[in-house]
Image (spheres, helix red, strand yellow):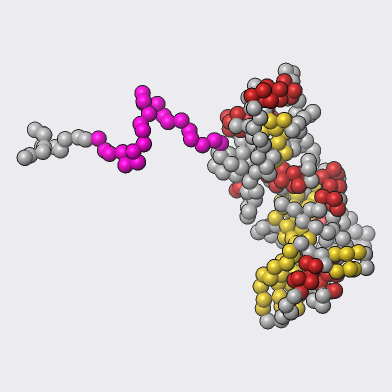
Amino acid sequence: MNDRNPQGRKPAGRKPNRQNKPQPKGGQKPARQHGTPRPGQKGGPFRSDAQEGYDRNLGAARTPQRPNRAKREQNFSTVHDPEGVRLQKIMASAGVASRRVCEDLIAEGRVEVDGKVVTETGVRVDPEQVVIHVDGIRLQLDTTLRYYAFNKPRGVVSTMDDPEGRTCISDYLRKGKVNAARLFHVGRLDSETEGLLLLTNDGELANRLTHPSFEIPKTYLVQVPGPMAKGVGAQLKEGMQLEDGFAQVDSFKLVDSTPGHVLVEVVLHSGRNRIVRRMFKEVGYPVERLVRVKFGPISLGDQKQGTIRQLSHQEMGHIMAAVSL
């Protein structure tokens, strides 16, 4: 039997729906099954941060718990300021995302104002009087505050000015065309130690980052003479008594071994002077080269030595969360 029509063409037929998905009625598009993308994902909050180099997308600092209806109404009445600015407009101006995406973030319960989750896009607040978090990441609304990461080379002293004329941090700030006025370094690295050094003019954050009570972890790559005997890592983790008190590393990992040299990674939260060098000397392995590659959640990544870069919104939010800001 001929299955062609009079024009010689095969009869048109509907293609089978292989996934057997129910078709929407009335030509309407199916409702979106997923919420706003997570931080760093396409269309999500802080999406530009993921494009600023190696391993910059840190994700959410924490996920707020969505309150029930009565609590949402109470939160709205508590934070709403009729004379204020719409919350989504403030968020968009702070670089979170487009205003439309910010509205979605609010509706999904991912935004907090003064610690209270708000879900109404009509809420207005005074940006000079409130603290706003998105996915646990604090928005820095004070445009006068600045935050930088500096990859310090060996031989540079951790000061903004050196009376002896040695190379210091401000020399690199001038090279990077960064205004050094009122900037200071968070902690310090001795002149022979390389790596990550944070610079800011935010005194409260700097004080918290250097205070022992917050125990901010710092990660170092340490090159020592090899081979290394078994048990050295355990000895460093168990700790030892130094001239200024007890010291230990939080973790120890062998990274690489070449003839005559060993490279290890250690994490510790102590910020005492030359602590890594003194600990390795105590176990019989004087440090040949020392590089700090991470300070809390901030990673050096592929940042070139001697360069200075501004911290992203995510990085700023995560390091503030680490010290309960």
Q: Is residue 283 above or below residue 212?
A: below
Q: Residue at x 59, y 41 (%)?
A: 38
Q: Is residue 173 visible?
A: no
Q: Is residue 216 above or below residue 126?
A: below
Q: Quadrant of the C terminus?
A: top right
Magenta stretch, main secondary structure class: loop
Q: Quadrant of the N terminus?
A: top left
Q: Which residues, given as a range, are shown in magenta?
A: 14-36
Q: Is residue 212 above or below residue 89?
A: below
Q: Residue at x 74, y 18 (%)?
A: 83
Please count the marks in the image. 0
Q: Is residue 29 visible?
A: yes
Q: Position of residue 145 (x, y in %)?
A: 79, 40
Q: Position of residue 57 (x, y in %)?
A: 63, 48
* Left or right relative to 126: residue 207: right
* Left or right relative to 167: residue 76: left
Q: Residue at x 76, y 74 (%)?
A: 232
Q: Position of residue 258 (x, y in %)?
A: 67, 78
In terms of depth relative to the viewer, which is nearer, 315 or 61?
Answer: 61
Residue 66 occupies quadrant: top right
Q: Residue at x 76, y 31 (%)?
A: 114
